[in-house]
Image: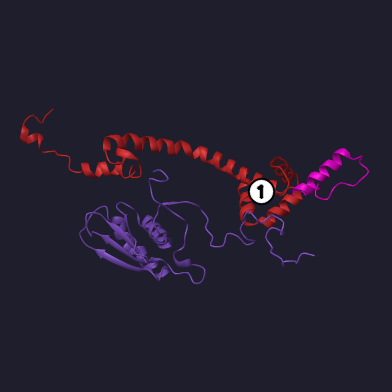
Chain colours: A red, B purple
Amino acid sequence: MVLLSAPRWLRSRLTDRFWRVQEVLKYARHFRGRKNRCYKLAVRSVRRAFVKSTKARREKKRFLRALWITRIEAASLEHGLKYPAFISNLLKSQVELNRKMIADLAIYEPKTFKSLAALAQRRRQEGFLAALGDGKEPDGIFSRIVHHY
Amino acid sequence: MTGRGSPSRFLAAVLHNGVGRYVRQLQRLQLLFSPTAADARGARQFVEEAALDFARQHPDVVLYINPRSCPAPLLLAEYLNGTVREELIASKTSEEIVQLATKLAGQSGLDIIRIRKPFHTNNPSIQGQWHPLTNKPSALTVHGPRLQPQ
């Protein structure tokens, strides 16, 4: 090391320690306890918070999908349909709405959701008739597949 | 950079801009550069070649050209809601400065932080938002005339 005497040691002082510390503490201000004030504790907590927030981005998609499914299940049970029947019959009727949109419709457009539930119910009945009937009756209207190509 | 550790806002337009007339939110652009520094060469070329065209294409933005000795060439954008954005244009070519200026002219002065949802509406429900009595029979909600006992 070249700085061997006291006057030379003092030449290079760290002057922006405050701002370096604040860079970390600003992400810890809403924490509980001493880790929102003390740098040594905050560094560890902030790093863990960042790691958790990175990993949680993958879980958020799963969590939101489960929330939508719960809401659609509750809404379709109000109309007398269970969730698997509702979704499968909607897909068979070529209604390709994703769960997010169906959940939003159930909250904000309840009449539209009621008509979707009725469509799924009718398609379900037609499916039963086609499976259990003898083939003498014509195919159901909502069972027709429309080809868009 | 967590969800609660850093600030966030909802998607918004300044004062419903665009519903009627569109008002450009950029108020003025100040170009601070040094006439002799080497990293301000792009800024000087921009002033010579492209500044007039930019000013003509954006007539509602005031463009101030300030050649003075400054440590680094800057593009200062001031918006109608008071936000001031400084962009360094050191060692940028004239085309890049034009692109940067066009980008700043298209922005509103709202903070550039995480936007919680990419959509926003003041009227989310047209048929009436669901409440627990929406799908119940109307005998529960409608109060008819009180019938006298027979």
Q: Position of residue A126 (x, y in %)?
A: 83, 45
Residue type at mark 1?
Answer: Ala
Q: Up-down: is A100 above or below B109?
A: above
Does any portion of residue B50 appear in the rendered image?
yes
Please indicate whether residue A122 sits to the left or right of residue A22 in the image: right
| Residue A82 x, y percent position in the rendering | 71, 42
Does B70 appear above or below A67? below
Left or right of residue A9: residue A106: right
Judging depth in this view, the residue of B61 and A63 nearest the camera is A63
Q: Height in image: A50 above or below A72?
A: above
Left or right? Give the position of A13 relative to B6: left
Secondary element at image label 1: helix
Q: Which subunit holds the residue at mark 1?
A: A
- Percent position of residue A147, x then y: 77, 48
Q: Which residue is tagged 1?
A: A75
User: The C terminus of chain B is located in which quarter?
Assistant: bottom right
Identified at 25% across, 54% down, the residue is B72
Residue B10 colored in magenta in the image: no
**Viewport quadrant of the N terminus of chain B:** top left
Residue A63, quarter of the rendered image: top right
Q: Which residues are magenta?
A: A120-149
The residue under the point 39% across, 38% down is A50
